[in-house]
Amino acid sequence: MPRLAASPLICLSHRIPRTAGFRVAPIAARCINITATAASSDPALEQEVNINPSPAPIPSPDARFEVVGSPFSLLSVSLAASQNLYTRRGTLVGFSGKTENTISTLSFLEPFRRAPVGIPFLYQKVSATSPVTALISTKNSISSIVTVQLDGREDWVVAQRQGLLAWTGTTLSLKPQYNVKLGLAHWGNTYITGRGLLALAGKGQIYQIQLKAGESYVAHPSNVVAYTTATSAPLPFRFKSSKILFQVPDLGFGTLLQNVKFFRVMGETATWRALARTYHTIKTWLRRSIWGDRLFLRFEGPTTMLLQSRGSRVSDVLTLRDVDEIAESPPGAVQDAVSRKIKEEIKEITSGSAAATKTPLASQDASDSPTVKYATIRHGKAEFEKQS
């Protein structure tokens, strides 16, 4: 139970009567300030994550993002006059300022490019002719928000489809991308470049990881919220399995079964095809649900990553086709295919340039040059003239 507030200033002094031959010494006084505080058993929360590329914060005259709440689940946005704010539809909680000077419209941001990869394309555009303050929240029950300030020196990639919450900035550009290298792990990324402010949302708490040059980090794709673009993009990675594989010789039973008329006819029926599709779907579902956590992403420094503590389900990240392709390919097959393709392209370029620059030399043998010979036909026989 907290104590009651006492007087903020208590001065103690004692009066001693003066007597002859006795010197009175002053007694020191001490000021005590006592205030009542509410008792709390909750542990102290961590500080909010605010990503700023420069050591000192750069003041923004247009807008200011501030994460509030416990945990950090609310975003306070201070907008200047004629500044546009884009927030996800249905996330605007409160508004402060002159509402009669505020305009809110529903914006469609590239629906034909965002919808196929599952990125939200419905956003609410808010602008006002006077300074206003907006309060934004997420739809998830357990989530946190971080702010990222872009100054044009680094570009960001939002790996989660629902990771982008709000943004503002006149030169900020957001484009959905279909990255072939990350298609196995992320099929809905947003590439962000320019100058402005971002608000990213994640499940659970969001933590920042910074990698220096020469360092590498392996993370699960469902926990990666966003990362900065580096010289090398993250590649799919799988840990080596400890299972033992036995090689069984092929005895030719498959060829023998194909020669049997009964199996050939059954393979062309709709019932057999339906059973094959059902078996394939069950096998792929088991791979995604039970063995789906074997897929990771490998990052190479220098880069900055944002990880969320609560990951998404594998079904939210990978499709049935992606899981089946990953399971069928052996470890390292993607990297080997990419290296082989690069070598083939280099070989073609080298051979093409060598053929274009090839010229005949004077020292070459005369037999290599083209010659013309004349023949005379007499009595059905051809006689070639000899060159002198």
Image (spheres, grey):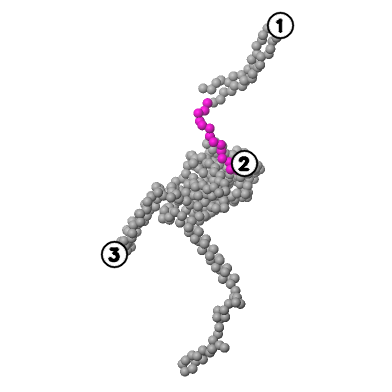
- Is 370 magenta? The answer is no
Q: Which mark is residue 260?
A: 3
Give the residues drawn in magenta, as a range. Answer: 39-52
Is residue 200 visible in the rendered structure shown here?
no
Amino acid at dot 3: Val
The residue closer to the viewer here, 66 or 220, is 220
Residue found at x 28% / y 65%:
261
Amino acid at dot 2: Arg
The residue closer to the viewer here, 29 or 194, is 29
Residue found at x 52% / y 41%:
206
> Which secondary structure lies at badge 3?
loop
Q: Nearer the viewer, mark 2 or mark 1?
A: 1
Above-or-below relation of 249 to 167: below
> Which secondary structure lies at badge 1?
loop
Percent of width and height locating residue 269? 32, 61
Q: Tag 1 or tag 3, which sits nearer the N-term? A: 1
Left or right: 296, with 304 as reference point: left
User: Mark 3 and 2 residues: CB-CB less than 8 Å, in contact?
Assistant: no
Is residue 67 visible in the rendered structure shown here?
yes
Q: CA gap, disc 3 to disc 1? A: 132 Å
Residue found at x 43% / y 50%:
240
Amino acid at dot 1: Gly
> Mark 2 — residue?
64
Q: Residues within 10 Å of mark 2 (few under 14, many from 20)?
A: some
Q: Which mark is residue 21?
A: 1
Q: Tag 2 or tag 3, which sits nearer the N-term? A: 2
Q: Nearer the viewer, mark 3 or mark 1?
A: 1
Q: CA gap, disc 3 to disc 2? A: 75 Å
